[in-house]
Image (tube, helix red, strand yellow):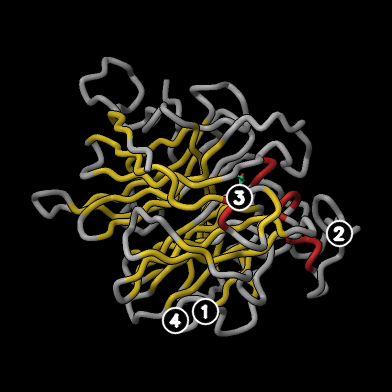
Amino acid sequence: QEKTEAVAGDSASSSSQSPLSKPLISNIYTADPSAHVFNGKIYIYPSHDIDAGVKEDDEGAHFAMRDYHILSMDSINGKVTDHGVGLDIKDIAWAGRQLWAPDVAYKNGTYYLYFPVKDKKDVFRMGVATSKSPTGPFKAELTPIEGSFSIDPAVFTDTDGKTYMYFGGIWGGQLQRWATGKYAANGSKTDLGNAKEPALSAKIARLSKDMLHFDEPAKDVKIVDKEGKPLLTSDHDRRFFEGSWMHKYNDKYYFSYSTGDTHLLAYAIGNSPYGPFTYQGVIMKPVKGWTTHHSIIEVKGKSDAAQWYIFYHDTELSGKTHLRNIKVAELTHRADGTIETIDPYPA
Ligand code: FUB
């Protein structure tokens, strides 16, 4: 396995930008970072962006990724280790193209890597691969997870031990093509176009005890405004587009996501993993590049003081929307539970 080391943000920087907000690695392009703390160490499961020479289109064909590299850090300001390829598309029996944003969960000595990839009919499905090590190599199951579709799995284990997958993405993520429950191959390339109807929702499904299946049919992740009304299709500044994440803070469930074509990371709070979630505001203003995608974790320092962080990406290194680099920044919950909006490029 390839193994390289890269140094994380240098805290001695004289830049006015937060020292944390620098590309975490530059030996490869990375995006969609799903971060987790396993055994006191930070592991990052990003997409591995490559230039496959595919023409850019609204369905994201230029995001033609073929493998995952797994990264780790001992601390937020520490070195980043690239552990090399943890899963390759050639080792996924049912895969066609486009290995997009993954996530990982741990249970009873096994790490589960959840990944979206188009099958041989060009339909996005979710697969799962397992390893005894957080850095892989991961071995993929022979078929996609039954009942799974679309993209961007985010796997959350609640304090009661139950694990859920949030997923979905409109436009190139194909969520709109599943509106009837069956895949519409000639369906819309964007959304359902009904501006005054509730927007398409992300999905949630509880995982089975063996972590390899959905334990229930996927349900809608409803996002409502402060009056309890669902966000509408026309509400591009607030409605769900892709990039789900879940974190729990002070017993509340924080569902965060990308608004896609308005390039915001937004969040909504609920009292249960299933929601409904009440829209609260923007976590991060637009980054360089079309896409924005994040994860949020709590990291305990040596003194046991905890700090929350957001991992995200932009296109600082390449200036190209399909060749991204991951970054990390501090995230602050205010006393009332709301989150301070992050400007990724403060003056
Ligand atoms: O990396 C490919 C896609 O771009 C992801 O699945 C989306 O969330 C967006 O970041």
Mark 3 sits on what residue?
99
Closer to us: mark 1 or mark 3? 3
Q: Distance between the residues labelled 2 and 3?
A: 30 Å
In which quadrant is the N terminus drawn? Answer: top left
Which numbered disc flags the more N-terminal residue, 4 or 2? 2
Mark 1 sits on what residue?
206
Residue 340 visible, this angle: no
Which numbered disc flags the more N-terminal residue, 3 or 4? 3
Q: Residue at x 33, y 19 (%)?
A: 16
Which numbered disc flags the more N-terminal residue, 2 or 1? 2
Question: Mark 4: few, some, or many residues within 10 Å (few <14, many ≥20)?
Answer: few
Q: Distance between the residues labelled 1 and 4?
A: 11 Å
Pick the residue in front: 67 or 168. Answer: 67
Q: Mark 1 near mark 3, Cβ–Cβ under 8 Å?
A: no
Q: How far apart are marks 4 and 2 (CA)?
A: 39 Å
Which numbered disc flags the more N-terminal residue, 1 or 3? 3
**Looking at the picture, how far across and down is residue 315, in whole percent?**
54, 28
Decide if ligand 1 comes within 8 Å of the CB at mark 4.
no
Q: What residue type is labelled 1?
A: Arg
Mark 4 sits on what residue?
210
Question: Mark 1: few, some, or many residues within 10 Å (few <14, many ≥20)?
Answer: many
